[in-house]
Amino acid sequence: MSNLPGGESAARTADLPTGIEPVVAHDPVPEPGTAAHDAAASKEAAETVIKAFGGVRGMIDMTLPGLVFIIAFNVTHQVAPAAWSALGLSALFVVVRLAKRETIQHAFSGVFGVAIGAWISMKTGKAENFYLPGLLYSVGYCVALAVSALVRWPLIGVMLGPITGEMFTWRTQNPGRLAAYTKATWAWVVIMGIKPVILFPLYFTGNVNLLGWLKVALGIPPMLLAMYVTWQILLKAPPPIKAQTDTE
């Protein structure tokens, strides 16, 4: 037993000639074509779901302005201050992301939607109209998802393909992933369709408080559920086939 700290392993390291680094054991990398390699590739591809939709941070950026609007409206009982408060928060999110040199895609889409809702609500004087653009967007999004699945260009695949590096090989070379992306897209149609089904009837009642609080409550949970379902589907799908570039 060596008296060096670390025992025998330290002694063996000390005996190595100068300039030769000790070999450190690492976990073996699965060989391409093996079941373990395919499982690891599928897991890596499945985890891109969170990245594609902006993660929890992106969902917060799109949800908090609606919460600020309904709180400010309850405090002031006026549409304009509530609308400006929500718009100001959305703009702040964009500024913060720019300062940190982060992507502003989701924050910018949020401020765009809030700006339209704020303008309509102030123009009409009806607080419930602040939520109208978001409701119409939800309907349009679900319709687009359904149409894309029907024509065999599922939007989930279109969105994730560039992130996973497969581009559109899933459509021409990988029927298992085409089926998985189609299944995931239909899952988004069903899950995200819950929001407009619940909220549109409330919009027509003019119950701003209930509409606002439910809009906030139905912001993040359905999206998290849709992302989880997609993740589970892609875990069981064949691994992506990387697209060949001109330099390869």
Image: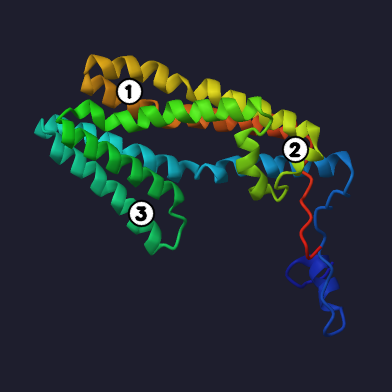
Disc 1 marks which residue? 214
- Which residue corresponds to the image point at 75% horizontal and 34% vertical from the top-left? 177
- Which residue corresponds to the image point at 44% horizontal and 44% vertical from the top-left? 58
Q: Is residue 100 left or right of residue 80?
A: right
User: What is the secondary structure assignment of the residue under circle 2?
Assistant: helix
Q: CA distance from mark 1 to mark 2?
A: 38 Å
Q: Which residue ends up furthest to the front in the rendered image? A: 151
The picture places residue 126, in percent across and down from the top left corner, at: 17, 27
The picture places residue 149, in percent across and down from the top left corner, at: 64, 27
The picture places residue 176, in percent across and down from the top left corner, at: 79, 31
Disc 2 marks which residue? 171
- Which residue corresponds to the image point at 17% horizontal and 35% vertical from the top-left? 123
Front disc: 2 or 3: 2
- Which residue corresponds to the image point at 82% horizontal and 70% vertical from the top-left? 2
Mark closest to the chain's N terminus, 1 or 2: 2
Disc 3 marks which residue? 94
The picture places residue 27, in percent across and down from the top left corner, at: 80, 53
Q: CA distance from mark 1 to mark 3?
A: 25 Å
Q: Specify the quadrant that holds the N terminus.
A: bottom right
- Kindly indicate the quadrant of the structure image that contains residue 244: bottom right
Mark closest to the chain's N terminus, 1 or 3: 3
> Is disc 2 in contact with disc 3, using a CB cutoff of under 8 Å?
no
Residue 248 visible, this orientation: yes
Q: Amino acid at mark 3?
A: Val
Structural crowding at the residue carrying mark 2, measured as other residues with C-alpha within 10 Å and reported as few (<14), some (14–19) or many (≥20): many
Residue 72 visible, this orientation: no
**17 is higher (above) or lower (below) than 60:** below
User: What is the secondary structure assignment of the residue under circle 1?
Assistant: helix
